Each structure stands twice: as C-alpha cells, then as structure tokens.
Image: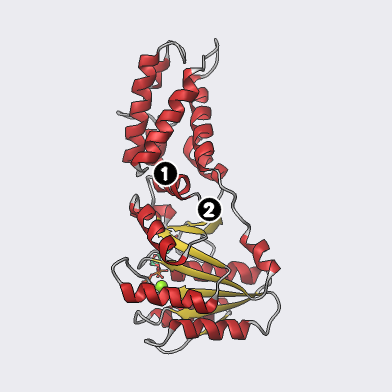
Amino acid sequence: MFDKLKEKLGIGKRQDGAIPSDSLTSGIGKSLGDFKDYTEDLKISLLEADVSLPVSEKIGKEMYERLSGKRIRFGEDRDRVLKEAVRMTIKDLTSIEIPDITREAERKSPFIIMLVGMNGTGKTTSAAKLAESFKDKGFYVVLAASDTFRAGAIEQLSLHSEKLGVKIIKHQTGGDPAAVAFDAIKHASKFMRAVVIIDTAGRMQTNKNLLEEMKKIQRIAKPDMVILTLDALSGNDAINQARMFDEAVKVDGYILTKIDADAKGGSILTLLAETKKPIYYVGTGQNYGDMINFSLDWYLDKLLT
Ligand SMILES: Nc1nc2c(ncn2[C@@H]2O[C@H](COP(=O)(O)OP(=O)(O)OP(=O)(O)O)[C@@H](O)[C@H]2O)c(=O)[nH]1
Ligand SMILES: [Mg+2]
C-alpha cells in the first residue's frame, strides 16, 4: 500500500529517482542550492504519485521553508530530520477533524446516511460494510435500495441484507428512489437507535437526470450525512468528482475505497488539502470487515515508516 509515494518521498526503500537526501550531506541549511534541488525533486515525485499540482507545489514550498532554517547537529540522523519535516508539512496542510459517525448516530434516530458516487466506486459495498458495523454496535439498521436505475442493483443490496440480517426497503427497478428512501425512514422511525443507509445509483457529471434525481432524494430524505465514495484508483480525478458532487448535494466527507489496490496513495493528500473535508473510512478489500477508520497518523505512518 502506498509503496510508490513512500519511495518517492525518499524514505524507506531507495531506487533511482528517489529523493537524494545525500544532497543534504553538507548539513541542512548550509546549502540552499541543494535545497532547491531537493524540493524540486520532491514536487515531481509527489506529482507522479497522483498528488495534484497545487498541493505538490505547496508541500515543496513548505518543506523548503521548514528546512531552510534547520541545521543537522552532529550525530543527528538526516533521514529522521527529513521524515519529521515531511510529516509536519503534510499534517499542517491536511489536518481535519474527523467526526465520529457512531457518536453522531447516537444523537438522533433514525440517523440517515446517504451514499453517493460515480459508477462502481463502492457505494453498495460500503453501504453493506456500514450496515454491519452499525449492527454490531447494536443499532437497528435499514438499507434503502434507492438505486432503482441499474438492473441488478436491488438484488445486489438484497443479498447483502440477507447475509447481514438487516432490514431492506425496496421498490421495483425503475421506481422513484426518493420514495424508497422515504419509506425506509418511515419504517426506521418506529425503532430506537435506528440508522438508515441510502444506497443510490452511480452517476456521472454528464447525466443531468440522475443528478437531479440525487438532489430529489436529498430533498425528501434530508440525510444527516452525505458521504461520497471515491475510488482510490481514480487518482487525480477523485478531486474533480469531489467538487462535482459537492456542488450538487453538498458532501460532508468521503469513504475512500479500494485503497488495498492503491500503490500511489497521493489522492488522499490532494483530497484533504484541497477540500478540507474528512475521509471517514477507507475500504481495504471486498469483505464486510474490510473498512477502517481513517486517521492522518495512520496514513502518515504508512508513508513514513
Ligand atoms: N479491493 C476492493 N474492492 C472494493 C472495495 N470496495 C468496493 N470494491 C469492489 O468494487 C466493485 C464495485 O463496488 P460496488 O459497491 O458495487 O460499487 P457501486 O458504487 O455501488 O457501483 P454502481 O452501483 O454500479 O454505481 C465491487 O466488485 C466491489 O467488491 C474496496 O475497498 N477494495
Ligand atoms: Mg451500487
């Protein structure tokens, strides 16, 4: 996971093109020329790892400033100084408070989560993973099969509901997805500590009807939380998707899926730095248990150790 970015940051495994920390042999702060080379290399490496241009430039500039005033004392480990500088720089740019969804759900019943995202990004799988997690915590879970658009979508969610033993509210394919969400909420209202998870159809920027339909679901269901699923493999396009969905339905935060297959890891940096919205969870596989809470320290530890 993230091996490429790790290599690019010049920490851990070395390879051709890795950041030449030897250029700092003369001592950090002594040779500004070396710093320029170093930060330039860093920027290019970040770009190659799917970090966007503005964010790469920001990190390069911050690193330069952070290191400029720094001197390596005799016996101090250069790698450690660099790692710490990278860690602090990224933390400064990306620190965002991540609300605890379970605690939020304790405050209101039914707590309504709406999942949105492009085709195949992992909405339905994430809905099932969330359902299991809430069920394990003792919530009454209702899945709303509001993807009435794609053939097979209702069956896919029904299968999850059977396996997990949670309630599903569904209508016919081609039906009104907002009405499904409405019925699911009505059903959940009869229970204490209930959570409604609305699975919606995948949609593209170009599909105006589906976008309008998504807004309608939001108007009717009034979700407490709109979560956008983003495929980690979509790289730099993740930020475009984030902006597009935010414009349409005002997204609260993200689930970043398929991170188990992401060798680059850069889209996380871009997403956090540019949108300042939290990543709640990351998907680490196809099974129900394969979703973990995101934390910046977890990510940085993966990158820097
Ligand atoms: N490796 C891996 N695969 C995942 C993860 N999340 C989802 N998938 C897989 O990605 C594929 C698409 O997932 P879905 O949950 O159906 O995606 P969707 O957004 O509901 O797709 P549409 O309904 O077609 O828009 C499935 O094969 C999932 O098993 C993950 O975190 N890791
Ligand atoms: Mg789906």
Percent position of residue 246, x then y: 44, 61
Which residue shows up at 44% across the image and 10% down it? Answer: 30
Residue shown at 55% from the left, 72% from the top: 223
CB atoms at circles 1 and 2 under 8 Å apart?
Answer: no
Q: Which mark is residue 2?
A: 1
Q: Secondary structure at mark 2?
A: loop
Mark 1 residue type? Phe
Q: Residue at x 33, y 54 (%)?
A: 237
Q: Residue 285 location in percent, x, y?
A: 45, 59
Confirm or reject: label 1 Cβ below 8 Å from ligand 1: no
Residue 35, by quadrant, is: top left
The residue under label 2 is 278
Residue 156: % across, % down: 43, 78
The answer to whether the residue bearing label 2 lies less than 8 angstroms from the nearest atom of ligand 1 is: no
Name which of mark 1 and mark 2 comes first in the sequence: 1
Whether residue 200 is visible here, answered yes or no, is no
Q: Is residue 41 left or right of residue 70?
A: left
Residue 51 against residue 228 in the figure, above or below: above
Please provide percent x and percent y for residue 151. Answer: 34, 82
Q: How many marks?
A: 2
Q: Quadrant of ligand 2?
A: bottom left
Tell me how far mark 1 sits from mark 2, CA to CA.
19 Å
Q: Nearer the viewer, residue 237 or 274?
A: 274
Q: Is residue 193 visible?
A: yes
